[in-house]
Image: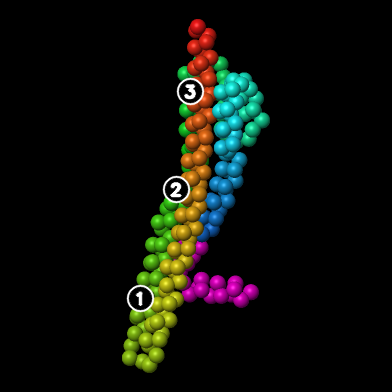
């Protein structure tokens, strides 16, 4: 209880700017949870990519498609749909490219908000500190104890800066984590798509021969 009361006390001492910082922190947590669940459902995983490419190379597209059909994630779904399409390599390549673009747009959704919060939170904290320091120095007069009051006012004003930095760090960590997962998913998709298209190209060459 004491920790909660102390947090509430510091929150009120930080000034009005603490409310937008609170909204930013709630937004970061909400976006991070939503994106984590979405990425978890969409990511087929690096292990799937390695197994799929190996299966295409050793056993062919049919066996690889059966393997992908039993796997989770968007990459597996796209590969199954592409393999079952009628048409040559060019048709499937266009389909894979289009589906990859749609998936990447969905994966990048809301990440810009985290980037904005990373930049905005320290500025809000700095604004709160400046406003607090203006208020602290405005009490300056010749009365006894004024220097102590000024020092206390500056200390309270710095709460906003500390809070803004904490929110920015949290947002930066979330943004970096999801960008890293996005890069891994792109790499996995490129490997799987290339393996499928190469197998289709070999199949077309055999048909021509």
**SS for tag 3?**
helix
- Residue identifier under label 3: 93
**SS for tag 2?**
helix
Q: Bounds of the magenta span?
A: 1-24
Residue 20 versus residue 46 in the image, above or below: below
Instruction: Describe the colour scheme in one phrase.
Output: rainbow
Could you tell which of marks 1 and 2 lies nearer the N-terminus?
2
Cα distance between the residues tagged 1 and 3: 62 Å
Instruction: Name the main secondary structure of what is drawn in magenta.
Output: helix
Cα distance between the residues tagged 2 and 3: 29 Å
- Quarter of the image where one finds residue 58: top right
User: Badge 2, how many Cα within 10 Å: few under 14, some, many 20+?
Assistant: few
Comparing labels 1 and 2, the label whose residue is closer to the camera: 2
Residue 59 versus residue 45 in the image, above or below: above
Q: Residue at x 47, y 28 (%)?
A: 97
User: Badge 1, how many Cα within 10 Å: few under 14, some, many 20+?
Assistant: some
Residue 197 horizontal/vertical position (percent):
50, 22
Residue 202 versus residue 67 in the image, above or below: above
Whether tag 2 and tag 3 are in contact, CB under 8 A, the answer is no
Cα distance between the residues tagged 1 and 2: 33 Å
Residue 114 horizontal/vertical position (percent):
46, 52
The mark found on residue 134 in the picture is 1
- Residue identifier under label 2: 112
Q: Is residue 24 visible?
A: no
């Amino acid at each position: 209880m004491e920790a909660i009361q102390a947090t509430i006390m510091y929150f009120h001492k930080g000034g009005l700017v603490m409310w937008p910082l609170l909204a930013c922190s709630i937004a970061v947590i909400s976006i991070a949870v939503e994106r984590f669940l979405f990425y978890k459902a969409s990511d087929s995983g690096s292990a799937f990519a390695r197994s799929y490419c190996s299966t295409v190379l050793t056993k062919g597209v049919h066996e690889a498609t059966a393997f992908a059909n039993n796997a989770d994630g968007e990459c597996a779904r796209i590969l199954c749909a592409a393999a079952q399409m009628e048409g040559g390599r060019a048709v499937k390549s266009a389909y894979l490219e289009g589906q990859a673009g749609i998936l990447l747009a969905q994966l990048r959704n809301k990440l810009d908000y985290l980037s904005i919060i990373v930049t905005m939170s320290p500025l809000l904290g700095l604004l709160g500190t400046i406003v607090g320091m203006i208020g602290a120095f405005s009490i300056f007069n010749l009365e006894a104890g004024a220097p102590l009051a000024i020092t206390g006012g500056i200390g309270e004003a710095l709460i906003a800066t500390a809070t803004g930095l904490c929110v920015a760090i949290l947002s930066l960590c979330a943004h970096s984590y999801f960008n890293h997962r996005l890069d891994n998913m792109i790499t996995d998709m490129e490997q799987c798509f290339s393996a499928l298209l190469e197998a289709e190209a070999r199949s077309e060459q055999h048909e021509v021969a």
